[in-house]
Image: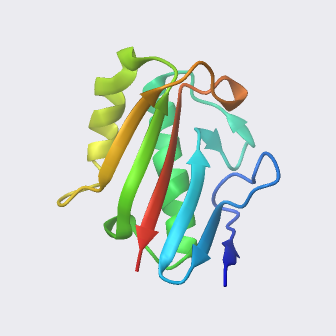
Amino acid sequence: MKKAIHTDRAPAALGPYSQAILTGDTLFLSGQVGIDPAEGKITAESVDGQARQAMRNLEAVLQAADMSFTNVVKTTIFLASMDDFQTVNGIYGEYFDSDPPARATIQVAALPLGALVEIEAVARR
């Protein structure tokens, strides 16, 4: 059994997918880029601003499923440039006080809407 999770506090899906799917005790969160949900577009030009917004978007979806970053067990970070690794890594680390999740970081050729960073996650109750 699966349940789609949706919140207006995170950007609407850009295609035929859900913000997250809850199946049993596991939540699969779709990748979030730095779209400001109030504006419906990426408003930050810097990777710093986009990473912070992506993390806020993930947090909103987690909260919609009655979870938080403490429930996250795996993330994947997609970067348009590995030159931004240290900046994004620092911002990402602010959200995980202890026992951070497993993670992969990958450089990609392009991201939706010209984003500089996208972050997806898996969480467990």
Taking the spot 37% from the left edge, 40% from the top edge, the residue there is 104
Q: Is 92 above or below relative to 95? A: above
Residue 62 appears in the rendering: yes
Location of the C terminus by quadrant is: bottom left
Res. 83 image quadrant: top left
Residue 48 drawn at (x, y percent): 42, 29
Location of the N terminus by quadrant is: bottom right
Residue 95 appears in the rendering: no
Q: Nearer the viewer, residue 78 or 7?
A: 78
Q: Is residue 26 left or right of residue 34?
A: left
Q: Give the image's coloring scheme.
A: rainbow
Taking the spot 55% from the left edge, 76% from the top edge, the residue there is 65
How many numbered marks have been drawn onto this rendered protein structure? Answer: 0
Q: Is 94 above or below relative to 51? A: below
- In the image, farthest residue toward the left: 98
Q: Is 122 above or below relative to 13? A: below
Residue 40 drawn at (x, y percent): 75, 43
Taking the spot 75% from the left edge, 52% from the top edge, the residue there is 13
Residue 76 drawn at (x, y percent): 44, 44
Q: Is residue 46 left or right of residue 93?
A: right
Q: Is 44 above or below relative to 13? A: above
- In the image, farthest residue toward the right: 16
Taking the spot 43% from the left edge, 30% from the top edge, the residue there is 106
Q: Nearer the viewer, residue 4 or 66?
A: 4
